Image (cartoon, helix red, strand yellow):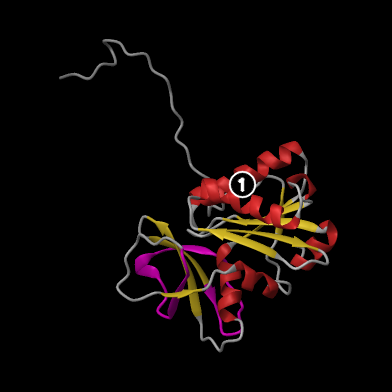
């Protein structure tokens, strides 16, 4: 689990892509240069590429000069995360380059906790069907494992969700919002294990999808329902 500084030292020029929220954020990090960030509230399938193009144009670089990708695997917008993963896999097929994944809630927790005296709190992202992705954080910014929790089982302490994350489920008590500005959060991430290399960029899921086996059956008088 390399630190962000190690990834940057190893590769020199990395592209960060995050479409977990309704604001797509793309960053260009280079050794010896100030970070470049571009964001857009347009549809992720378009803004991922326009923001990438804007970063490269500002730096005077081509996509082929990117040496590694860093991306958010979720939780958050499944469509946005999968679009990012698809883009990276496509770019890797043209020029093989490593990719490193991170999760949205742990880095949002670092950004929210930094410089504040927080009691215990829980970061939330809506998981639909009246459930939530939950990350419990204590007063020393120690984080528990990410879990999926039903609305009725949410903890009693403060609940926080990153800004611009979509929320469908309803709660009987308020949820605070915290910043999800990567330009401000990424400089705070070098002390923790947030990044993991992956050979197959994909969206985060708590468990693998479960598919029912389909058996083909020829329709006939014997299989027709009796009326």
Q: Nearer the viewer, residue 57 or 156?
A: 57
Vertically, is 18 above or below 222? below
Classify mark 1: helix, strand or loop: helix
85 w.r.t. 125: above or below:
above
- The percent coordinates of residue 153 (x first, y second) are 38, 69
Residue at 30%, 10% (x, y): give it. Answer: 220
Q: Which residues are magenta?
A: 136-164
Location of residue 120 in the rendering, given as x and y in whole percent from the top left corner: 51, 82
Query: Along the horizontal axis of the image, is 223 left or right of 181?
Result: left
Which percent across, then down, holds residue 124?
46, 68
In the displayed structure, 7 sits above or below 61; it is below
Residue picked out by circle 1: 85
Which residue is nearer to you in this view: 100 or 213? 100
- Residue at 78% x, 67% y is 5
Residue farthest to the bottom?
Answer: 117
Q: In the rendering, at what x and y percent does residue 64 appear?
A: 77, 44
- Which corner quadrant holds the C terminus? top left
Q: Name the residue located 50 percent from the left edge and 44 percent from the top edge.
A: 209
Question: For residue 107, what is the image quadrant?
Answer: bottom right
Q: Is residue 145 left or right of residue 219?
A: right
């Amino acid at each position: 689990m390399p630190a962000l500084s190690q990834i940057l030292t190893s590769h020199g020029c990395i592209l960060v892509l995050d479409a977990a929220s309704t604001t797509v954020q793309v960053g260009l990090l280079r050794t010896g240069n100030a970070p470049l960030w571009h964001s857009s509230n347009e549809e992720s399938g378009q803004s991922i590429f326009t923001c990438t193009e804007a970063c490269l144009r500002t730096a005077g670089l081509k996509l082929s000069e990117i040496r590694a990708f860093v991306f958010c695997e979720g939780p958050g917008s499944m469509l946005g995360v999968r679009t990012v993963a698809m883009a990276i896999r496509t770019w890797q097929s043209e020029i093989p380059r490593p990719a490193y994944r991170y999760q949205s809630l742990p880095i949002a927790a670092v950004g929210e906790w930094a410089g504040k005296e927080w009691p215990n709190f829980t970061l939330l992202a809506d998981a639909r069907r009246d459930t939530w992705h939950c990350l419990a954080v204590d007063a020393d910014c120690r984080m528990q494992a990410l879990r999926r929790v039903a609305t009725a089982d949410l903890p009693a302490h403060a609940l926080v969700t990153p800004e611009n994350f979509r929320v469908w489920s309803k709660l009987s008590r308020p949820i605070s919002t915290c910043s999800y500005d990567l330009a401000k959060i990424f400089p705070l991430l070098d002390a923790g294990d947030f990044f993991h290399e992956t050979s197959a960029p994909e969206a985060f899921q708590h468990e693998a999808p479960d598919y029912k086996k389909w058996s083909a059956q020829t329709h006939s008088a014997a299989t027709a329902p009796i009326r």
